[in-house]
Structure formats: C-alpha cells, structure tokens
Amino acid sequence: MIKTLIPSAIHVQVASFREAVSLANAHGFGGLDFNIKELADAIDTTGMSEVRSVFEQAGVKPAVFGLPVEWRQDEEKFQIDLAGLPRLAKAASDLGCYRTATWVLSGSNDRPTEENRAFHIARFGPVARIFADYGIALGLEFIGPKTIRDSLKYPFEYTCFGMLDLAKEIGPNVGLLFDVWHQYTSGGSVSEISKLTADNVVYVHLNDAPSGVEIDKQVDNRRELPGATGVIPAKEMLTALVGIGYTGPAGVEPFNEALGKLPSNDAKLSAVMDSINKVWP
C-alpha cells in the first residue's frame, strides 16, 4: 500500500500541487491525492515531462484524483463535465495515475430507491466507459452512519457489498473507495474483507471513531485520527486488505477539528503520519 497525502482532508493548505508534492516528500508520504484539473492545466502550460519530474524527483506517486465530474446535479452541467473528461483522463493516464473516486450518499429525499439506482447507473456508466479507455478505475464510497440514513426519506446502498453490487452493474472498472469509518458504522466486519479481491478496491481511507459513542449514534464529521481510540480496528482492516493483495493508496480522512487547530502544515502532517504508523500493517 501507499501512504497517501490528502491535503484537503487534514486541513493542510497548499498553493499548488508542487507544494503538496514537496510536503508529501518531507513527511514520508509515498503518494498524493491530487486535483487532476490543476495537473492537466500544468501539463498544457509546461509539458508532461516537467510535471512528471516534480513527482519523480520527490519520490512521490500521483496516486489518485477526485472524480472531476459534477454528477449529482443537473444534466447540463453533467454533460459539460463529461465532454471535458477525456482530456483529464488522458492526463492522468499519461502521468501513471489510474485511480479516481467519489462518494455516494446512502439515501435520497427526492428519488425512491430503484429510481435512484437507475440515476447512479446512468450517471456513472458513461464516466466509467471514458475512464476504461485510459485504464482508469473508479471507486465508489459507501456511506455507513445510521445518523445519515435516518435523515433521508428513501434508503440507498450503505454497505461494502451493496455498493460493490452497484459498481458491478456500472462497469468492470468500477469498485470501492473503502473507508474504514464507513465499514465500521455500516456494521461491517474485518472478516468481510477477505471476501473482496484486490480489483474490488480502488482506494482506502483511514480514521478512527470517538470512544463512548454507540455505532448507530456516530456522526460522520466527528472522527479521530487513525489509532487514536482503537474503536475502529483500522490496523486489522488494513492487514486484511493486504491479505487480498491490495497495493494501492491509503490516505487519512479524519474530519478532525483538533487537527485543524494545529499551528502549521508541518505540525498537521507530522500528527497524521504518526497516526498512520500506528495502524500500518
């Protein structure tokens, strides 16, 4: 697996991908979760070899990028983003990055369940087909907390295998963004991971849960750094992922207020790397 920096998830402010790569290198991260639109623009301006050299000289991989398509809103915006996707997919592929991901809400107040399923297949299908032309896998994140599900009128997939079933309907290059928080809050277990294959998992997120809170009362944006409480068996989950042959990126996404109050990027990155090392197999 690749210890991957997600700057925006840990309150790290960077002016450019170059600064992000430099910080990743300085703090021992082997990969970067990046904005593909920024890199594609940089490639157009300075050339592929210059952008690639930024990563190579730092020993940091362009590991994964956020899905650059606004698929949740109106059809017009979706079609505009879809039309621009081949350029971005080519840029990622030429950089050697073959993974992207997004999250899928565990319900809707507007679309009944089957209609919602059809909507997701209709939106992700053409996206996945474009990515397939460039060898890129799309990871879909299931959202586990019952506190979110209870707020939505119509239920939708919220477990690992439910989301994987949806992914398989969309395309062969679609799998999971596997977040240990959502595996825990959805009621999933460590042992379930052995039923997955490495190809099922596109990306991994790490964190921990507050102690003294029942599973069904956990709130999504109140998390801890990996290994902080031990409520989530993150190390065991990572070990199981290694056991199925997963070798891709794993980044920290704690939504943690205390982390954001640390005085500098370096302080935040040091705290995050310490937390990763607590749970790393």
Image (spheres, helix red, strand yellow):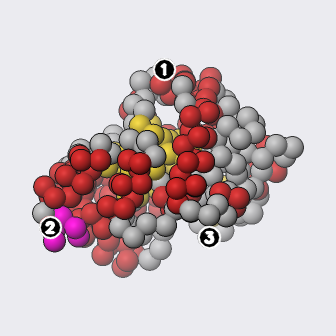
Residue 53 can be seen in this image: yes
Residue mark closest to the camera, 2 vs 3: 2
**Residue 203 visible to an observer of this rendering:** no
Q: Secondary structure at mark 1?
A: helix
Tell me the crowding category of disc 2: few under 14, some 14 to 19, or many 20 or more residues within 10 angstroms, Cα based.
few
Q: Is residue 73 above or below residue 187?
A: below
Residue 42, magenta (yes or no):
yes
Type of secondary structure dominating the magenta stretch? helix
The answer to the question of whether label 2 and label 1 lie on touching residues, with beta carbons closer than 8 A, is: no
- For the image shown, how many numbered marks are present on the structure? 3
Q: Amino acid at mark 1?
A: Gly
Query: Residue 243 has which mark?
Result: 1
Disc with the residue nearer the chain's start (1 vs 3): 3
| First to last magenta residue range | 41-45
Q: Nearer the viewer, mark 1 or mark 3?
A: 1
Q: Position of residue 281 (x, y in %)?
A: 54, 25
Residue 110 numbered mark, or none: 3
What residue is shown at x 38% (from left), y 47% (from top)? 25
- Check disc 1: other Cα within 10 Å, few if <14, some if 14-19, many if 20+: some
In the picture, the quarter occupied by the N terminus is top left
Instruction: Select label 2 or label 1 by which is in front.
Output: 2
Which residue bears the numbered disc 2? Answer: 46
Give the x, y percent position of residue 52. Answer: 20, 53
Q: CA distance from mark 1 to mark 3?
A: 40 Å
Q: Which tag, 2 or 1, sits closer to the chain's start?
A: 2
Residue 10: where, in percent of width, then height? 56, 57
Decide: is 262 above or below 98: below
- Amino acid identity at mark 3: Asp
